[in-house]
Image: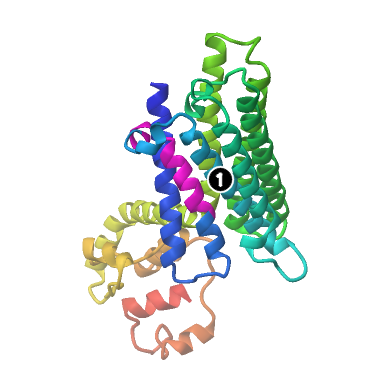
């Protein structure tokens, strides 16, 4: 069950990363930093794909002991370094350095090369599978995990600090999205500390408890990365959530006011409610007598159409009668339902 959960989280993470990459590549408003973020997301996508056993089994090179570890370490190192560079770019002063010449990116390449060299120098029988959280007593394997996780901890901590500073500069749902990304980076930093604890305490913590703790840490790592990706996706997620809530609210108001408006239009046949174009006109097609009349003001308009005056609402000023062409004045033409509706809305 835990293996299935790991595969499910990795697959969902890949889909979220690919969706963000497509949005960046084919978005209507490309930014100068889009290639940097695309490279970061692409590197992490490769690492996440290797994390799926079904995908890893179809890669002949990934069946060699230690190769899957190198692919994941390289992808995560490059991704975290570029993500930290992306977040710190708007906070730096002076001329920005191209990301492919940045210190973090070059350091990530150097760390990846060092990890690959350590893994290659380890005998095959001592190489471990990072996806199964297996550790050996060989000093080279311990060096791979310690060096890699220290670099991951540094990059995720830098990203969390950058997010915390950016939150103070933005407002609204964007600030919430950046805060969610910061929480994800902090959670990922916690998983790095946990992995260091696992390497240090393997000899004294061997057994089922150690295995379950290491697997739980891996699942928590996937969840932390998902939270960070959710921070990148937060603007479309927010818009979809708000749009769905508005449609639900409109449907609720339609169910409440639709029967009342049908009775009112039967009493006032001269009230013509035009349909609206687009998706918001769906309510008009469902019920031609309904338009967007909401909450208290709609009920007050309904009372005006029936000839009653709502409590606590004074009569309209004379200017409103002059705008309606004298309708409602003594001796003037009798106002129609549409004129009363406009007068009430004004």
Answer with left or right where residue 163 lies relative to residue 327. right
For the stretch drawn in magenta, the main secondary structure is: helix
Answer with left or right where residue 15 lies relative to residue 288. right
**Figure check: 166 above or below 202:** below
**Figure check: 169 above or below 216:** below
Q: Which of 64 and 241 is in front in this view?
A: 64
Q: Nearer the viewer, residue 47 or 337?
A: 47
The image quarter containing residue 135 is top right
Give the residue displayed 29% in from the left and 62% down from the top.
261
Magenta residues, start to end:
40-56
Give the residue displayed 59% in from the left and 41% down from the top.
184
In the displayed image of the protein, which residue is found farthest to the right? 93
Give the residue displayed 44% in from the left and 35% down from the top.
51
Q: What element carries label 1?
A: helix
Residue 94 image position (x, y, % from top left): 77, 70
| Residue neighbourhood size for the residue with mark 1, other residues' Cα within 10 Å, grouped as few (<14), some (14–19), many (≥20) | many
Residue holding disc 1? 228
Q: Nearer the viewer, residue 222 or 176?
A: 222
Residue 302 shown in magenta? no
Answer with left or right where residue 142 lies relative to residue 91. left
Residue 21 image position (x, y, % from top left): 45, 57
Residue 45 shown in magenta? yes
Give the residue displayed 60% in from the left and 51% down from the top.
176
Which quadrant of the figure contains the N terminus?
Answer: top left
Residue 327 image position (x, y, % from top left): 39, 86
Residue 333 image position (x, y, % from top left): 34, 88
């Amino acid at each position: 069950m835990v293996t299935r959960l790991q595969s499910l989280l990795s697959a969902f993470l890949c889909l979220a990363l690919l969706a963000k990459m497509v949005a960046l590549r084919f978005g209507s408003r490309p930014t100068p930093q889009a290639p940097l973020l695309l490279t970061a997301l692409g590197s992490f996508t490769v690492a996440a794909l290797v994390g799926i056993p079904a995908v890893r089994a179809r890669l002949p090179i990934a069946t060699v002991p230690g190769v899957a570890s190198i692919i994941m370490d390289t992808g995560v190192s490059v991704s975290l370094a570029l993500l930290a560079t992306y977040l710190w770019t708007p906070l730096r002063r002076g001329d920005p350095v191209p990301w492919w010449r940045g210190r973090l990116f070059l350091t990530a390449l150097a760390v990846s090369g060092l990890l690959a060299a350590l893994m290659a120098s380890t005998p095959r029988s001592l190489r471990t599978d990072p996806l199964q959280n297996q550790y050996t007593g060989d000093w080279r394997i311990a060096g791979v995990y310690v060096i890699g996780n220290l670099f991951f901890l540094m990059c995720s901590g830098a990203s969390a600090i950058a997010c915390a500073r950016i939150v103070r500069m933005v407002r609204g749902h964007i600030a919430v999205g950046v805060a969610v990304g910061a929480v994800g980076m902090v959670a990922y930093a916690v998983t790095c500390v946990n992995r260091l604890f696992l390497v240090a305490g393997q000899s004294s913590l061997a057994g089922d408890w150690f295995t379950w703790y290491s697997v739980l840490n891996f699942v928590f790592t996937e969840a932390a990365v998902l939270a960070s990706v959710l921070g990148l996706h937060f603007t479309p997620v927010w818009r979809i959530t708000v749009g769905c809530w508005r449609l639900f609210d409109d449907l609720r108001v339609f169910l409440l006011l639709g029967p009342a408006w049908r009775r009112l239009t039967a009493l006032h046949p001269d009230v013509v409610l035009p349909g609206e174009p687009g998706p918001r006109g769906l309510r008009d097609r469902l019920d031609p007598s309904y338009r967007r009349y909401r909450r208290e003001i709609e009920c007050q308009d309904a009372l005006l159409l029936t000839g009653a005056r709502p409590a606590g609402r004074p009569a309209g000023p004379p200017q409103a009668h002059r705008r309606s062409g004298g309708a409602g004045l003594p001796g003037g033409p009798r106002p129609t339902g549409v004129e009363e509706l406009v007068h009430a809305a004004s």
